Image: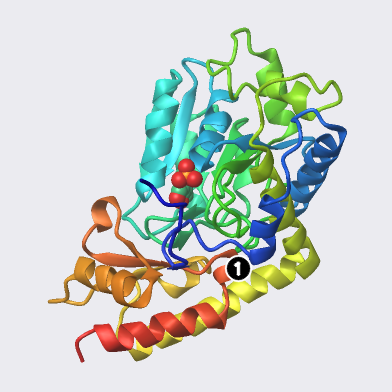
Amino acid sequence: QLTPLEMPNRLLLGPGPSNAHPDVLQAMNRPPVGHLDPTFLKLMDEIQSLLRYVWQTENSMTIAVSGTGTAAMEATIANSVEPGDVVLVGVSGYFGNRLVDMAGRYGAEVRTITKPWGQVFSLEELQIALETHRPAILALVHAETSTGARQPLEGVGELCREFDCLLLVDTVTSLGGVPIFLDAWGVDLAYSCSQKGLGCPPGASPFTMSARAMEKLQQCQCKVANWYLDMTLLGKYWGQERVYHHTAPINLYYALREALRLVAEEGLANCWQRHQKNVEYLWEGLEDLGLKLHVEREFRLPTLTTVCIPEGVDGKAVARQLLNDYNIEIGGGLGELAGKVWRVGLMGFNSRKESVDPLLGALRQVLPN
Ligand code: PLP
């Protein structure tokens, strides 16, 4: 006989999900309405305008995809890549490789520019790669969650216009926590998630595309190869027509709307500043414990920190002990960095001193002196 569900209330300081704000969880408990109910349609409009605010974009095609960040990632690829397009991907971590795999599945001729994991591309390096490959799309990861590095994007959009290519950017670990100016930076396609900087449960993922990207989509002779994520269809649900497309995960959209409202209430610039202030407090604490950080300070993310596992320390055992004895989740390394780093996320609601202190206290106990 199963008993009613109970789950532990962990402090989630891994690469995501992070803890949702209590108000967001409350919002999720509101009774569901239909996906064409006028109150829900109004909520969708609110989500759209709040997403434009947090991304700093005027793109009319700005929506939440019903699915996790990977679904929104696939939406950007499916709606921009035509078979045979050259797609240039910047790879310096795990998620760059996921973009490579995905673009290839949509028939792209994928080229890569690579850097060691934890480093970022300079504007000069990107310019040379654009000259060499002449891609239809350049895809970059703004916040590489596998390494904790922030890819600067200033000037990249201008370069892409010079080379007549679209700029596609992964903002999964940056939205809400790291300054982003999509329009000022000339980003054409971007996606994110709900469970990190926005402090919401996973499942409703921000997506946006510029008028330039819409034009390419409209001129394409072939149908989008993914029915569920086809923006020409989804646009009719999110736009004026309100044509049924799929049954939206109603309560997740409540949560996303509330999470976005909280960011707006705090003010986007304040939210970014809070992330920066708290991560600096974390870095100081980790360094006081004798730990080294993987990424050069200038390019470190305020949302995710990669910490080098000291020689002789069993990284998995430490993470296990934090979970079992202290109720704190941190992440291990992915791909090339597996076994070499821990990943500590301070995102959304968790970007606060009250989250950092328990972790530093626990590490002080758990790590050998
Ligand atoms: N891109 C980046 C940079 C990520 O960190 C993640 C997940 O952590 C994803 C894409 C995929 O998002 P999701 O796990 O929500 O599908």
How is the structure coloured here?
rainbow
Secondary structure of the residue carrying tag 1 is helix
Which amino acid type is marked by label 1? Phe
Please say whether residue 184 is visible from this viewpoint.
no
Query: Looking at this view, is 269 or 213 the one in front?
Result: 269
Residue 289 lies left or right of residue 209; in this view the side is: left
Q: Callout 1 environment at 10 Å: few (<14), some (14 to 19), or many (20+)?
A: many
Q: Is residue 69 above or below residue 333?
A: above
Q: Identify the residue at horizontal 35%, vertical 74% (top origin).
A: 293
Query: Which residue ends up furthest to the top in the rendered image?
Result: 221
Query: Which residue ends up furthest to the left in the rendered image?
Result: 312
Q: Is residue 78 above or below residue 5?
A: above
Q: Residue 274's quadrant in the figure?
A: bottom right
Q: Identify the residue at horizontal 42%, vertical 62% (top origin).
A: 148
* Residue marked by disc 1: 349
Q: Residue 365's quadrant in the figure?
A: bottom left
At which x and y percent is residue 94?
Answer: 35, 47
Numbered disc total: 1
Q: Quadrant of the N terminus?
A: top left
Q: Is mark 1 within 8 Å of ligand 1?
A: no
Q: Residue 309's quadrant in the figure?
A: bottom left
Q: Identify the residue at horizontal 71%, vertical 47% (top origin).
A: 254
Q: Quadrant of the C terminus?
A: bottom left
At which x and y percent is residue 35?
Answer: 74, 30
At which x and y percent is residue 244?
Answer: 74, 20
Query: Which residue ends up furthest to the front in the rendered image?
Result: 1
Residue 274 lies left or right of residue 50; in this view the side is: left
Please say whether residue 151 is visible from this viewpoint.
yes
Q: Is residue 15 above or below residue 229?
A: below
At which x and y percent is residue 10?
Answer: 44, 67
Residue 143 lies left or right of residue 331; in this view the side is: right
